[in-house]
Image: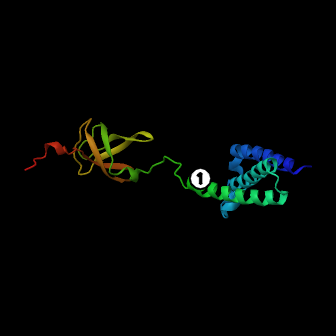
């Protein structure tokens, strides 16, 4: 078998394996957790880079096959290292979830949709990136807050949002004397 065919078939097999990994990669996800260079995506990318570079060099140059192999391994390691540090590692540390905790909503402004009576409970709605959230609320100082008023979430206790009526400061009306 000619060495170009070895590179070419290896490239085809790694291409097919990469496509399968994209679809079924969750099954083998934990393999590379301890040692990052044992990650299947990194290994498949290395073999793909080496085989692609080897094939191109074998077809386009008259170099000795050992020089082609050495050159393609060097190029593959460099490209694989760049892939790992510039693409795979940053993607692994990105935030995937849009989940929130009630405590993380403190400091946000909401709107009263069910009036909050004195010493009682009402309901507020808070707009977030994941949509509208309806939450049980009471006045921070047990005050009455009417329907439609904007409120500031001060804190959350046992799932109940403690709020105060919110009045935005209009800096254009501040006396500049």
Number of other residues with Cα within 10 Å of mark 1, as a class: few under 14, some 14 to 19, many 20 or more: few
**At 71% across and 45% down in the image, what residue appears?**
24
Viewer-nearest residue: 47 or 169: 47
Viewer-nearest residue: 85 or 108: 85
**At 51% across and 51% down in the image, what residue appears?**
95
Q: Is residue 146 above or below residue 176?
A: above
The percent position of residue 136, horizontal first and vertical second, equals 36, 44
Q: Which residue is mark 1?
A: 87
Name the image quarter holding residue 82: bottom right
Horizontal arrangement in the rendering, residue 176 relative to residue 142 (left or right): left
The percent position of residue 166, horizontal first and vertical second, equals 24, 45
Q: Secondary structure at mark 1?
A: helix
Q: Is residue 102 above or below residue 131?
A: below
Horizontal arrangement in the rendering, residue 111 relative to residue 67 (left or right): left
The percent position of residue 19, horizontal first and vertical second, equals 72, 43
**At 78% across and 51% down in the image, what residue appears?**
57
Name the image quarter holding residue 68: bottom right
Viewer-nearest residue: 57 or 92: 57
In the orientation shown, which residue stands out farthest toward the front? 62
In the orientation shown, which residue stands out farthest toward the right? 1
In the orientation shown, which residue stands out farthest toward the bottom? 34
The percent position of residue 12, horizontal first and vertical second, equals 79, 44
**At 23% across and 41% down in the image, what residue appears?**
145
Give the tally of numbered discs.
1
Colour mapping: rainbow
């Amino acid at each position: 078998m000619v060495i170009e065919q070895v590179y070419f078939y290896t490239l085809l097999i790694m291409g097919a394996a990469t496509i399968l990994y994209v679809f079924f990669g969750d099954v083998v996800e934990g393999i590379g957790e301890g040692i990052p260079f044992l990650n299947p995506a990194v290994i498949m990318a290395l073999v793909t880079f080496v085989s692609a570079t080897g094939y191109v060099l074998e077809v386009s140059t008259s170099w000795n096959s050992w020089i082609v192999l050495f050159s393609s391994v060097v190029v593959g390691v460099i490209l694989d290292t760049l892939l790992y540090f510039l693409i795979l590692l940053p993607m692994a540390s990105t935030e995937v979830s849009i989940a929130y905790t009630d405590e993380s909503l403190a400091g946000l402004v909401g709107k009263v949709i069910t009036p909050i009576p004195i010493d009682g409970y009402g309901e507020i709605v808070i707009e977030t990136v994941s949509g509208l959230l309806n939450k049980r609320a009471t006045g921070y100082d047990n005050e009455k807050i009417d329907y439609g008023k904007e409120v500031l979430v001060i804190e959350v206790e046992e799932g109940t949002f403690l709020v105060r009526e919110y009045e935005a400061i209009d800096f254009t009306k501040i006396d500049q004397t």
